[in-house]
Image: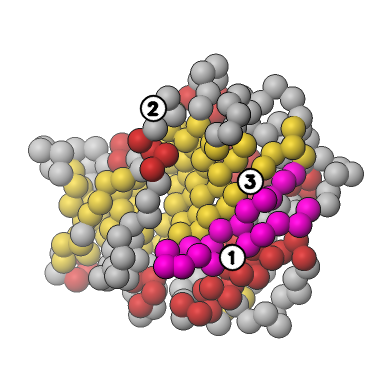
Amino acid sequence: MAKTQDATALNDWQVIGRIKDIPCGRPRNTRLLGQAIIAERDPGGVVSVVEPDNDNRALPVRERYGHVWTTLGEPERDMLDMPEFTEQGRRLITCGAITVRTSPLRIVENFLDLAHFPYVHTDILGVEPQTVVAEYNVEIRHPEDEIWATQCRFFQPQAATSASGGQISEYMYRVTSPFVTILYKTCPIRDGVWDLIGLFVQPNEQDICDVHSFVLVFDEDNSDESMLHFQQMIFQQDRRILENQLPARLPLNPRDEKAITADRSSMVYRRWLRDKGLTFGAIP
């Protein structure tokens, strides 16, 4: 597939891997928006990214939030800001890339969906018969141009690795770009504090993506390995559903798929994508 002409996708910062996945002297070959790219770290520790099919054109590079980012175009705004990454006592666990054969937009939309918890993540993030999604608020915030869903509440038998029993978890969802979404979740061990779980989705092709996830939490008891395994288990449950959704690309026309009240975040997300004119990974 040729590189997309979608200006919205091209002129945005995109993740291409974890910082530790680009060691010195071992180039990382990958794809971004239909284009082959190569990332490499030199002996001085500097990462460079080039387009081999475009005379090795050098691309901008940022190392942030445990990951390496680049862009094929000219971003009109800076990368997302997450001040929680500088807070003392938080632990960052990066989960590495998982390839999923679906649109990167399907990944983000699934992440926003509370209703699937009891059915896909049974006895962990949800349980029958407690399946009702309570009313929540969703809005597009300006001038940030971000989607926020707030006052989301759901009963969860095991909300996180650190949880010792079931609880009503409160969520906030944040979408900062078409391929980046963050969950702010009730911290089981500290009152008034949010744990963060996020997805940085690398759009390889229209219907193939690499999902790079992280958790940024307060947790003094569980090992990095146990938290990593918990997140991987949850995502692998989602992956089976995602790769069987048809069509793989996300329909943006509201008449193409029926929605219910619990899908308000999805409806706002799709409208937001339409307003941006995004076409990569979508059916306009």
State yes or no: discs 3 and 2 in contact (Cβ < 8 Å): no
Is residue 35 among what the camera can see? no
Q: Tell me residue 229's x, y (percent).
A: 56, 30
Magenta stretch: residue 152 in it? yes
Amino acid type at image mark 2: Gln
Is residue 60 among what the camera can see? yes
* Coloration of the structure image: secondary structure
Residue at the disc numbered 3: 171
Left or right, residue 2 beside residue 184: left
* Residue at x 42%, y 25% (from the top left corner): 89
Amino acid type at image mark 3: Tyr
Q: Tell me residue 71's x, y (percent).
A: 29, 63
The disc label shown at residue 130, or none: none
How many residues crowd around disc 1 within 10 Å: few (fewer than 14), some, or many (20 or more)? some
Amino acid type at image mark 1: Glu
For the residue labelled by badge 1, is the local secondary structure a helix, a strand or a loop? Answer: strand
Displayed quadrant of residue 118: top right
Residues rendered magenta in the picture: 133-154
* Residue at x 61%, y 57% (from the top left corner): 149
Residue at mark 2 to residue at mark 1: CA–CA distance:
30 Å
Residue at the disc numbered 1: 139
Left or right, residue 77 beside residue 84: left
Residue at mark 3 to residue at mark 2: CA–CA distance:
22 Å
Dot 1 or dot 3: first in sequence order is: 1
Magenta-drawn stretch, dominant element (helix, strand or loop): strand
Looking at the image, how many numbered discs can be counted on the residues? 3
Q: Tell me residue 137's x, y (percent).
A: 67, 59
Q: Tell me residue 157's x, y (percent).
A: 76, 32
* Residue at x 71%, y 31% (from the top left corner): 158
